[in-house]
Amino acid sequence: MKITVLEKKDNFIKFIIEGVDSGFMNSLRRVSMTGVPTMAIEEVEFTKNSSVLYDEIIAHRLGLIPLKTDLKTYKLPSECKCGGKGCKICQVKFKLNAKGPKMVYSGDLKSSDPKVVPVYDNIPIVKLLEGQEIKLTATAVLGFGREHSKWSTGLMIYQNYPKIKIEKVKNAKEIVDVCPRGVFELDGKELKVKNIEACNLCLACVDKSNGGVVVTGDENKFIVTFESWGQLDCKTILQNAAKQLSKRLNLFEKAFEKAMK
Ligand SMILES: [Zn+2]
């Protein structure tokens, strides 16, 4: 297996992976999006809500606010020593106290842990008019995106690495123009591939050239893009995804062994 990174930021990574198949890629995609724990608000206790929105709508909105996640300090409620009752190792508390007139934003949430705060301060929650008030305590816990999308880490997409073969082409200029991704260029009158990794296998060039250009996807080489919602950086998510995948395979191995005895 070989990986070449094309682009890397905290919340975005693009890389080429070789020596794997689509089955492996799909497992990796699913586990990195929904099998790595992140923090999200799970319970909300309202002491006052005179806004125009029902408690449930506000609670749902709060749940969807991405929270910076600290996997070293916090444990899943199901794996915590407290047995899931709730303690400092498996819960973070948020307080929200606001009086109208104002727009209430995610940044108004006061966290009990300065490391676990909303990723963005400017997500609107509810608009309060003169005399309206909201007062609540929210509890955030670690969870998995496979249980609820509020815990999903981000989005992974992958495609087969393009293989482009230029055979007989009469209308080179037209093919350069028809490609929406700018893959081709003209070298004199000859058609040439300029940027193969931009190709998303749309096959517009194949149609335009009447088969003069042949495009296929490599079955064992992929271009992978991962964008994180910000709770964790891409490196942590993908490293953790590999651990989660092998953890589940170990569980399978043990269970299978037991079942076959
Ligand atoms: Zn606990």
Image (spheres, rainbow, N blue to C red):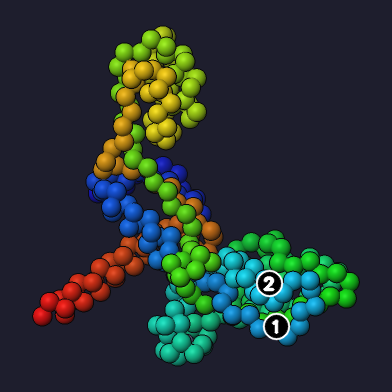
Secondary structure of the residue carrying numbered label 1: strand
Q: Residues within 10 Å of mark 1 (few under 14, many from 20)?
A: some
Locate residue 167: give its quadrant: top left
Asked if labels 2 and 1 touch by Cβ distance under 8 angstroms, the answer is yes
- Closer to the camera in the image, 147 or 114: 147
Residue sitting at the far left = 261
Where is residue 239 drawn, in percent x and y?
Answer: 37, 61
The foreground one among 187 and 253 is 253
Q: Position of residue 82 (x, y in %)?
A: 45, 90
Report x, y in % for residue 74. 47, 78
**Front-lying residue, 206 or 64:** 206
Q: From mark 1 to mark 2, how far is it between C-alphas?
A: 10 Å
Q: What residue is pinned by disc 2?
A: 58
Q: Which residue is mark 1?
A: 46
Residue that appears at 40% across and 66% down: 35
- Residue type (three-letter) at the residue carrying disc 1: Phe
Residue 220 coordinates in the image, percent (x, y)? 26, 43
